[in-house]
Image: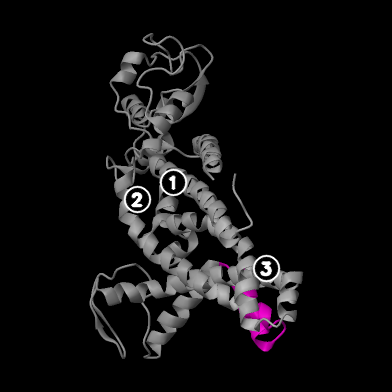
Amino acid sequence: MTTFLIRRLIQMVLVTIVAAVISYGLLYVQPGGPIDVLLAERQNSGANRINEADIQRVMQRFELDLAVPVRFSRWLIGWPKGPIFGSVGADWVVGCATPGQVRLRYPDGRVEIVEEGCEKTVTLADLEGRKVSGGVVFGDFGESQVMLRGRPVTDLIWSRLPYTLYLMGGSTLLAILLAVPLGVYSAVKQYSRFDYIVTTIAFIGTSVPSFVFGIFFILLFSVLAQRAGLPYLPPGDAVGVRDYTIPLIGMVEAGSFLDRFLRVLMPCGVLTIISLAGWSRFVRGSMLEVLQQDYVRTARAKGVREQVVILKHALRNSLIPFVTLLAGVLVTIFSGALITEAVFNWPGIGRLFVDALSRNDYNVAMAILFINVILLLLGYLITDVLYTIVDPRIRLS
């Protein structure tokens, strides 16, 4: 086990670096960016020209005047304050300095891309004077550049994380607790009326998009129920801003436990149905396969009670493939549900990631991506360890 864990940790480090390079590169080449945001602000304000000083300020703020390897290294490990390559202590040009390199000019408020030599180079002394984060591998994700300008990214993530854990943790736990018994009972009672009902519901849950469920829930449990004078659920937000009255329940104080509980019911129900549909079918299929094995038929032939055969001999072995699905639970609980959070205006991590991408807040987006990679790798490691618990025949070496 120790050798296996050491080998997997080394693999996790390598995969993390590769994933960080790929995700950083994808955000680097995506359309839009700080310069485009500056241009849009100037156009909206009616300015005819763009101040060169503003361009330089934006480029230095986002370190766009640095070479990509230097920028990536400073983001990943918080180093160097000087150059990575070449002799230590020597000035090293990390901006564009050679003729023929691309540079931006802004004549008459219009953007042109021309090829010429840059007038200014970035040297070691320039880098030494800049503030450098400790690196994301050490938990320093830098500062938010747009959403909470100048505030640490960790503050923004921590402010949204409780809402995501509240929503995703509850829906995931509820889906697991329901999916396993439903899948097992459907397999044991194959082709029964109960099996047909669960199968139909599962097909609907896996085929209908989450935003359709969300809109349907809002119309049914909020709009129509309120118009009919029945108890209804608040249609969105995690916390109310004012008190309200619900029939048969009475006055609900904004920000109270009851208010938060009522508001989480619909998004939690949508996510539970979607997860429950897929997981219950997976458990059913795995259980049906195990029930056809020779050792199950042997146990029945020896006169073992059916309940013992199902719970002791079949269920434990059928859960081995299901454990694989649980590898992504950590990522799911942290990252939230992008579409569902948008439909119900839920202030979770998923909504934060979408806002960060749409507003070009790269530090926030990269922090969420990096944490998701780490959690996914940890999930696979935990899954491998769980294999030895579910199936004692498996040994890790």
Q: Name the residue under label 2.
A: 157
Secondary structure found at label 1: helix
Q: How crowded is mark 1: few (under 14 residues within 10 Å), some or many (20 or more)?
A: some
Callout 2 amino acid: Ile
Q: Report how many numbered discs are placed on residues in the image.
A: 3
Determine the residue positioned at 34% across, 50% down.
Answer: 157
Which residue range is magenta in the image? Answer: 185-209
Is there a contact, CB below 8 Å, between mark 2 and mark 1? yes
Numbered label attached to residue 135: none
Question: Which numbered dot is residue 286?
Answer: 3
The part of the image, by quadrant, that contains residue 59 is: top left
Q: Mark 1 points at which residue?
A: 371
SS class, disc 3: helix
Q: What amino acid does circle 3 point to? A: Ser
- Dividing the picture into quadrants, the one containing residue 100 is top right
Kindly report the distance in space between the C-alpha atoms of the residues bearing marks 3 and 2.
38 Å
